[in-house]
Amino acid sequence: MRVLSGIQPSGDYLHIGNYFGALRQFVALQEEHEMLLFIADYHSMNSVRDGAQRRSFTRSVALDYLACGLDPQRAMLFRQSDMPEVTELAWMLSTVTPMGLLERAVSYKDKVAQGQPTDHGLFAYPVLQAADILIYRSELVPVGQDQKQHVEMARDIAQRFNNTYGEDLLVLPEPYIPEEVAVVPGTDGRKMSKSYGNAISLMAPRDDLRKQIRRIVTDSTPPEQPKDPDTCTLVALLRAFADPGAVAAVEQRYRTGGIGYGEVKARLADAIDAHVAPMRNRYQRLLTDPAELDARLGEGEQHACQRADRTLARTMVAMGL
Ligand code: ADP
Ligand code: TRP
């Protein structure tokens, strides 16, 4: 199957929520599928308004991707803007996209509800995302829960396009969200997000990682008192990174009393560190070799370009362009 996903370069590092919710799936999927992965720099224009910053974020997200263990033979990495054709397809798609569909987008409604300024780019965001997916004839789109609706919208838009211009022109994609993938909480207990200032950086040096984990907010229940594991951020994070046996033992000690948050934080730091240490080593090596990153982005772009050109040519003929 052809699998595609993208991550926005909207911060200067990826966090462990991005890893658990997205990158980890990409690395697993490359074993059996053709993977296309891109850095959604066009999408980031809705939030990042500084060119130099976007350039630097884009490179650093690319580095994070590669360091996670993507195999250059199986997973192609490129920048969204290396394929300006997606904006052309986005325009075509926008002409068959009902306003009502976009008005129902949860991400858009959230921003409106928060009173944030909205513009056309934010409103049309799902159409650009649909073009990203459809231009490469992607079949499977691994994403976190929060992106599921966008993939369903891409499917809906593709169906409308096919109904209008010809069946089978565009492939209808499926979201891929493994059941066990939970939302990873941040240091303040809300969803971990670059934009909430509550993120634990994926490639942080070991000492920084421990420092960030020590900052996780807990209540003041003393160690000997029983606690509810299901409402504790530390346990939620442990479930994402520690093996199930170790998690069960900690949960048991929460219920009976006799475990302090300091100990849980130390266990959590060990569990996360065991996961990220090999990635961090690759990251450090890649940092010293910028040419390697450029070469990988160049290869990915060429590979993606061939697929995009074919789809665009077919849709243009069908539309009489
Ligand atoms: P952020 O909220 O930090 O800006 P993005 O929206 O760029 O993150 O998300 C990139 C990918 O990582 C998406 O597939 C998203 O579903 C996933 N993701 C982001 N935050 C989390 C989280 N806290 N837990 C699980 N997955 C997440
Ligand atoms: N909107 C996605 C996010 O914020 C990023 C993205 C852009 C994407 N285009 C995509 C994800 C296409 C999957 C497929 O996380």
Image (cartoon, helix red, strand yellow):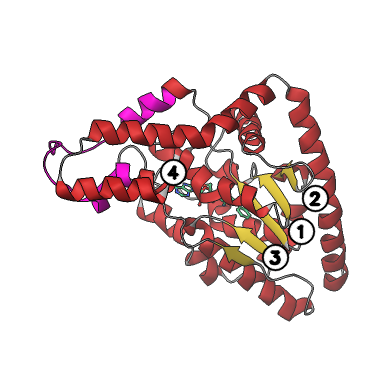
First in sequence, mark 1 or 4: give its number: 1
Q: Distance between the residues labelled 3 and 2?
A: 15 Å
First in sequence, mark 4 or 3: give its number: 3
Q: What element carries label 1?
A: loop
Of tags 4 and 2, the one toward the viewer is 4
Q: Where is residue 1 in the image (x, y as percent from the top left)?
A: 73, 63
For the residues bearing labels 1 and 3, Cβ distance under 8 angstroms: no
Residue at position x 60%, y 26% in the image: 281
What residue would you read off at disc 4?
Answer: 241
Which amino acid lies under the numbered mark 2 shown in the image of this protein?
Answer: Ala
Q: In this view, does 265 lie to the left or right of 45?
A: left
Which amino acid lies under the numbered mark 4 shown in the image of this protein?
Answer: Phe
What residue would you read off at disc 1?
Answer: 136
Magenta region includes residue 52: no
First in sequence, mark 2 or 1: give its number: 1
| Residue range corresponding to the magenta coloring | 208-235
Along the line of sight, the residue nearer the viewer: 57 or 273: 273
Q: Distance between the residues labelled 4 and 2?
A: 33 Å
Residue density around tag 1, few if under 14, some if 14–19, many if 20 or more, within 10 Å: many
Q: How far apart are marks 2 and 1 (CA)?
A: 7 Å
